[in-house]
Amino acid sequence: MASDPFLEAPTLRDSYGIQGDWRINDMFHLTGWGGYALARAQGQDENGVDRSGYGADLWTWSAALSVIDIFKEGSVFSVAGGQFVTAERIDAFPGDLRVPDRDTPYIIEAQYQYPLNDNILLTPGFYVVINPEGDEDNNSIWVGALRTTFKF
């Protein structure tokens, strides 16, 4: 519900965030961020219902730990996880089907940046989305990826 809390009604959003980076030492690097948004409907939804003044609280966060120069100089292994934008509260008319996300959607990911040489970087990785669309009845989504970066 976080992606469209007011059934396509025009929406304003005030967003707030915080982030931090901590280079623990030459090998370990920790990052994290969090965000909050107050969304407010500004007109009619897709069914012609005036949603003006209705609000929603949206939350998100992420954290990552990176290990530098593991197995090869210039490489980086990272593991991360976080919460996709989640609607914790949505104002609604009595009887509306719009409710906050029932379950919190999470993402967990890992990747390994491996420099083949000064100009080519390979980055295999994977991620899993748990409770997609904020519903634990949905199957988790598993994705693998291989990215190649060329530097000129």
Image (cartoon, rainbow, N blue to C red):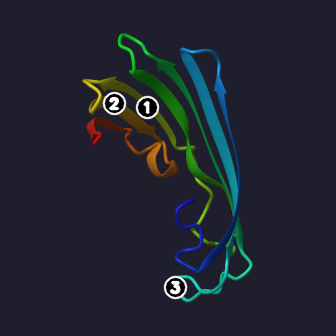
Element type where label 1 sits in the image: strand
**Residue found 27% across the figure and 42% down from its top:** 152
Sequence-wise first label, 1 or 3: 3
Q: Which amino acid does label 2 sit on?
A: Gly
**Residue found 66% across the figure and 82% down from its top:** 42
Q: How far apart are marks 1 and 3 (CA)?
A: 38 Å
Give x and y (percent) for residue 92. 68, 71
Q: How far apart are marks 3 and 2 (CA)?
A: 42 Å
Give x and y (percent) for residue 97. 57, 68
Using residue 16 as the reference point, say whether residue 69 is left or right of it.
left
Residue 2: quadrant of the picture: bottom right
- The reply to whether discs 1 and 3 touch (Cβ–Cβ < 8 Å) is no
Q: Which residue does the numbered mark 3 point to in the structure image?
A: 47
Please, is residue 75 above or below residue 89 in the view?
A: above
Q: Which residue does the numbered mark 1 point to in the structure image?
A: 109
Sequence-wise first label, 1 or 2: 1
Q: Which amino acid does label 1 sit on?
A: Glu
For the residue pair 151 and 2, the one nearer the viewer reads as 151
Residue 20: quadrant of the picture: top right
User: Most extreme residue toward the bottom, as rendered?
Assistant: 48
